[in-house]
Image: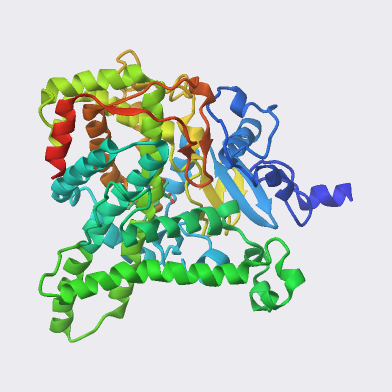
Amino acid sequence: AVVLHSRLFSRRGSPHGPNPLPLIGNVLDLIPVAGAGIYSDGRQPAAISKTQPITPATPMHILATRWALTYGAVVDINVFSQHLLFLSSPDAVQDLLEKRGAIYSDKPFMLMAGELCGCQNMVAFTAYSGQSKRQRRLLTSAFGARAIPTYEPLLQKSTAQFLDAVLSGASYARVRALAMRYAGGLTLAVVYGYVPVPLSADDNGRDPDPFIRQATECVNILQNEIASGGGIWAVDVMPWLKHLPLEHIPIIRSLPGLNFQKKARLWKAKMEDFVEAPWAFVKSSMASENPSTSFCSTLLQERQKENEKTKQDDDTFDFDLKWTANSMYSASGDTNVALVTSFFRAMSLHPGSARKAQIEIDKVTGGSRLPTLDDRTQLPYLDAVFTEVLRWACPVPLCLPHRLMEDDVYNGMHIKKGTLVIGNIWAILRDETLYPDAHAFNPERWLETDTPVSDKEFEKRRDPRAYVFGFGRRRCPGAQLVESSAWLLIAGVLATFDIGASQTPPDEVKWEGGVFRTPAEFDLDIKPRSQAAVALIHQAAQ
Ligand code: HEM
């Protein structure tokens, strides 16, 4: 049996990794992390040492990073013969996901998430095909570098409204909700031309806007239900289960993993409404006497003119646009929450950095106005804080899986077609050769002149933006928007608020979340810097 096992599962010519068992592969290596809840990954090197025990709270990115210490930057595991390849170095992600993007940009077919829950046409789930390419072109026209300056007034206004809402109370939970509203409100306005119902003092933590509430609920279902456990359900491994009447057999439907049918039906209805409701708003607004202008309405009008010329009707265009619009809307929420809450956490742990940024901002604005994007070149310390927040926060630690479309060979290792390839962004952003004392939040690392800053290649290689937003042909299409919107938000917060110092030692900070890494709840203490700051906010928000 030992000989047979070693023949069948020999890793000669394949990437290394923990030994798999027959049939189930590395399932037992994954079980300890299946219930990851609140965790601390800030200790260097204990958190990732090879000997530290794995507990149910150990997140997947730490487990993958430990494997990298043992087996190297390219680690292969398999789950019931589905290979997963973790890439934990800048070279590996660059060589495979970027340079060989033509074959590393597909997405896995996920029966539960895609077909049964109705998410298969969201951009992040679409196979690398004509559809995904058309959708990405639409995304670039909405949020590419050239489009962003046209949104500046909206960004400025949304920032002021965020600050105004913080003035009337800012627990950690409220800041989370406001960060969700900020991102959701921006995309709703740009994409659908919809202006959310304003917050009021008596909303008791419940967002008054139906679309924002719907987005919060659906993104939560997507992240914490459908995609929990890596998005792999029993029915993904045994597709024939979908044909069985499991719901009608009480004993069977109560078994873990087999109660998926009822859930899928419920979630699919919610997801469909999430896509259709804002789309219906665009259509009815366009037909009204007072139509609002939006990304969707502009493209629909252009297409209508085109159709009149060619005398053809193009359903594909409407379909692509509807799903692309939803993808922008749904992908911006949790990522923004993760980034913005991490910024508040960093400032609570490092009041000295916040103070330095405030002094710099005051010099430029004179304390008489909110910062604008035009000020950015004069605010190098604030830029360093922003870059360090991107690195330290690492909002999506394991990227999203890419699927390899044909057999490949890398550094002598054979990688099988169909392998799911996962960029371990967290491991890269904690690489000591790129970021000495990598676990520390240290904006100064972006200002130091004794590191080889003159070396352009090195600078490019260590810029967190090369990793935080994913890779190659699936890289996040919202990156340019975040670069402006999140920068403006943190500039506005620092210009007008003081964030109270936290008692937690920095390396004991707790985090949570599987797909998106967010600080666990903490005592957030935010106060306006002065009455003048309050007046500034009121004025800008009106
Ligand atoms: C802090 C903010 C954000 C972070 C850290 C982030 C990060 C990411 C990452 C890591 C991916 C996976 C890329 C890959 O598979 O290689 C991704 C995909 C995506 N993001 Fe973002 N994102 C952010 C904000 C946004 C915003 C504001 C939008 C919308 C305007 C957006 C839209 C998308 C879409 C549609 C995809 C799927 C792309 C595809 O599969 O082709 N993201 N994002």
Figure quadrant of residue 460? top left
Q: Is residue 290 above or below residue 338?
A: below
The C terminus - image quarter = top left
| Image position, residue 192 (x, y; %) | 24, 63
The residue depicted at 23 percent of the width and 37 percent of the height is 488
Left or right: 103 as drawn, with respect to 76: left
Of the pair 99 and 336, the residue shown nearer to us: 336
The residue depicted at 44 percent of the width and 67 percent of the height is 271
Left or right: 55 as drawn, with respect to 445: right
The answer to whether residue 446 shows anywhere in this view is yes
The answer to whether residue 110 shows anywhere in this view is no
Q: Is residue 514 above or below residue 80?
A: above
* Residue extending furthest toward the bottom: 311
| Image position, residue 311 (x, y; %) | 18, 86
| Image position, residue 465 (x, y; %) | 35, 37
* Residue extending furthest toward the right: 1
* Residue extending furthest toward the top: 450
Q: How many marks?
A: 0
| Image position, residue 216 (x, y; %) | 40, 55
Figure quadrant of residue 197? bottom left
Report the coloring of the rendering.
Answer: rainbow
Q: Is residue 457 above or below residue 256?
A: above
Q: Is residue 307 above or below residue 88?
A: below
The residue depicted at 22 percent of the width and 33 percent of the height is 492
Figure quadrant of residue 239? bottom right
